[in-house]
Amino acid sequence: MKIKLILDDKGLQRGFVNFKSANIIAVKNTLNIAAGLTRRNAVANVKKDFILRNSWTVRNIQFEKVNTNKIKKMESRVGATSRAGYMADQESGGQRKRSSTGKTSIGQKYARQGQSKNRPVSKNKYISRIGKKIVKGKMSKNYSSHKARFVAVMAKAYQKKLFIKRGQNIYRVASFTATGGRVRAQLQHIYNIVDKNIYLTPEPWLKPATIKPARDIFNIYKSQLRKLWNDGKII
């Protein structure tokens, strides 16, 4: 996202013998400061509003400084790098990009840190690890009924600390007892596997970050001119 600076410098030239040079420096500094402030606000918004696994997303919210001395061509840019391109989907909403398998694994309460839906998925519950520990096979040779087969699958998962899959869901067997022909088991929902298109509602994190810097930009510009005057660098 670009931050544009439109200035009315009437009355600000007084006291500068070389106002042209001072103006170039002040405009460049102003755009860089505004971009830096926007980046800081954007990072704060992301930390507040999104569930982050690590600092990857925050590190990839960056800003580019002005790289020219020609005022008409000056610009500073703020946003997420291409490596965090998924943040553009969060900003504007729309259809989420599908994985190579065409499926999306959505971590549920028991997959997340502290069993909270507002926390990231625990590392030991990443789907890449869970997928390798799902009970395989239908065990149809030993059990005639569907119920009996499922009981056997749960028993095996509980004993060997594996996971089970039912339809589009993955579970952990937290407890399992079988006495007198009665079975008691507690299943914890770990993942829901979605193979349909997922649509994201807009959750702007960048646009709100520009509001205050844009509102303060002329004051930033004046303070930069004043600083140049006070420092006596260009008068």
Image: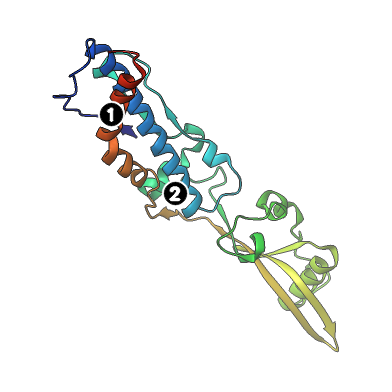
| Extreme residue toward the top, this view | 18
Mark positioned earlier in the residue sequence (1 or 2): 2
Tag 2 secondary structure: helix
Would you say 194 lies left or right of 31 here?
A: right
Q: Where is residue 183 in the image (x, y as percent from the top left)?
A: 78, 83
Q: Is residue 166 visible?
A: no
Q: Which mark is residue 190?
A: none
Q: Position of residue 34 (x, y in %)?
A: 35, 33
Occupied quadrant, residue 116: bottom right
In the displayed structure, 170 sits above or below 227; it is below
Seen from the viewer's position, the closer of residues 18 and 45 is 18
**Amino acid type at mark 1:** Tyr
> Which quadrant holds residue 25?
top left
Q: Identity of the amino acid at label 2?
A: Asn
Residue named by callout 2: 45
Of the 4 image quadrants, the one containing the C terminus is top left
Which residue is painted at 22% across and 10% down in the image? 17
Circle 1 SS class: helix
Residue 221 pos. (x, y %): 28, 28
Q: Give the percent coordinates (x, y) of residue 229.
A: 30, 20
Of residues 37 and 133, the one nearer the viewer is 37
How many marks do you count on the picture?
A: 2
> For mark 1, what is the residue?
221
Q: Nearer the viewer, residue 92 or 159?
A: 92
Can residue 233 be seen here? The reply is yes
Marks 1 & 2, CB-CB < 8 Å contact: no
